[in-house]
Image (cartoon, rainbow, N blue to C red):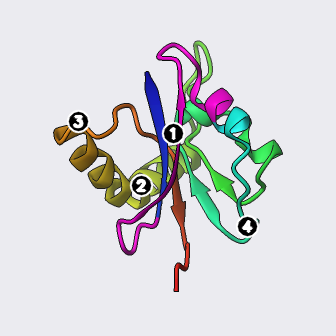
Amino acid sequence: MKNQIIADPKTGLIVCTAQGKGKEHNFNIFKKSKILLNYDLEILGDKGYQGINKIHKNSKIPFKKPPKKDLDKEQINFNKTLGKERIIREHINRRLKIFQILSNTEIDIKGLDLD
């Protein structure tokens, strides 16, 4: 089983979850979940969410290295910056995995206001 979470990075609160089969791609789980997100919210995903920009314009995912080529410096810097932004959310994922609440959690939102 693969789980996906949407969490507020400021509070660490989990907003919602979605599940899929273990071999199912992250992006397919996201599409099937039909989670409605405000377009002002920024989604920070991993490489498993290739194509999410077509559904949610305010999304960031890392660049994938093309076959037999390297990423340019700008793409490398973008990936590093994105990784630093996502690390807070990965700590949420880590806590869930330690307590075996969820596993394979991947998607996060930046700027979610729950007040």
CB contact under 8 Å: marks 1 and 2: yes
At 62% from the left and 63% from the top, the residue drawn is 42
Residue indicated by mark 1: 46
Which span of residues is magenta-colored? 8-29
Answer left or right for 34 relative to 60: right
Q: The residue tagged with tag 2: helix, strand or loop?
A: helix
Q: Earlier in the sequence, mark 1 or mark 4?
A: 4
Q: The residue tagged with tag 3: helix, strand or loop?
A: loop
Q: The residue tagged with tag 1: helix, strand or loop?
A: loop
Vertical placement of residue 110 versus 81, above or below: below
Q: Mark 1 or mark 3, which is nearer to you?
A: 3
Q: Mark 4: which amino acid?
A: Asn
Q: Nearer the viewer, residue 28 or 35?
A: 35
Q: Mark 2: which amino acid?
A: Arg
Q: Earlier in the sequence, mark 3 or mark 4?
A: 4
Q: Nearer the viewer, residue 12 or 66?
A: 12
Residue indicated by mark 3: 100
At 22% from the left and 49% from the top, the residue drawn is 95
Residue 2, quarter of picture: top left
Crowding at dot 3, Cα within 10 Å, few <14 / some 14-19 / many 20+, comes out as few
Residue indicated by mark 4: 38
